[in-house]
Amino acid sequence: MFRYDAAAGYWQREGDDIYETRAQGLLRRVCKMAANKGPTYPYGSIRHVRDTVASLKVLAGQGPLSSATPPPVVVFRNGTYNLATGTLEPHDPDHGATYGIAADYKAGAACPPELRRLLTTCYPEGAGSIVRALIRWLIDPSIPYGQAFHLLGHTGTGKGTLLAFLLGLLPTDLQSSLGVCRPYRPARRVQRTLRPQTGSIRCRRLLVLLTIAMVLIRL
């Protein structure tokens, strides 16, 4: 389930354990009157708690994910940029955003000096447009699902620095990583990472998705 964070400006997913703890505290206070025995408190078991949370999920529905398409907005710390109108608006739960950028929106801002130095020092001429596309891919919800960037390059070519910059745009609770194992061939590496011995359907679908829609950047 989701909870709207007014300070952040977007809906945040909360784990079931939070609601299970709250539900158990309430259920244990519900009494049942029995003849000649007075009140008893028979609720609060694991089954009661899980059934209650499951019912809450049905009542809450999909929340901000109920729309068939992502909302055309990008949430920044100082407001929400509307991609349809090209304007910065106040944060609003009706926007339906589920992530935000850990930076302020500055109209017409130039490339940060640190990033410009990285581009001119580590990457070949013309890499700026690729990096801009990568930043847009990261923050723009209108980019179609199933497209991905793959950073390739030797040690010391700036891959990790660029990745650190990109991750700095997102709050830590929106970041995750996937370990990569050897051998060295990229196709086999992806296959062994995403298709374990048990072979889940989800992993196989993700493998096909990455194989079909991989965008390669050679640094």
Image (tube, helix red, strand yellow):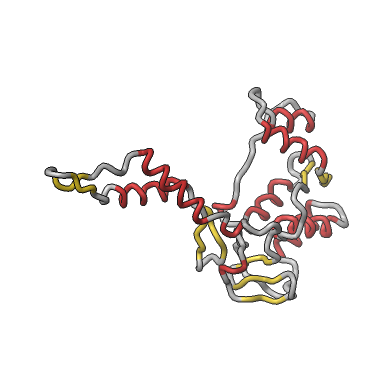
Q: Is residue 218 left or right of residue 102?
A: right
Left or right? Give the position of 98 relative to 36: right
- Compared with residue 25, is residue 155 higher up or lower down, i.e. above or below? above
In this view, the residue farthest toward the front is 35
* Residue found at x 65% / y 51%: 164
Depth check: 31 or 116 in front? Answer: 31
Name of the residue lying farthest toward the left: 36
- In the image, what residue occupies the spot 69% across and 57% down? 68
Q: What residue occupies the far top of the structure in this picture? A: 197
Q: Position of residue 93 (x, y in %)?
A: 56, 68
Q: Nearer the viewer, residue 12 or 104?
A: 12
What x and y, as percent, mark residue 25? 31, 50
Residue 193 placement (x, y as % from top left): 68, 31
The picture quadrant where one finds residue 69 is bottom right
- In this picture, is 208 found above or below 99? above
Tell me what residue is drawn at x 64 percent, y 35 percent.
179
* Residue found at x 38% / y 38%: 47
Q: Is residue 27 left or right of residue 85?
A: left
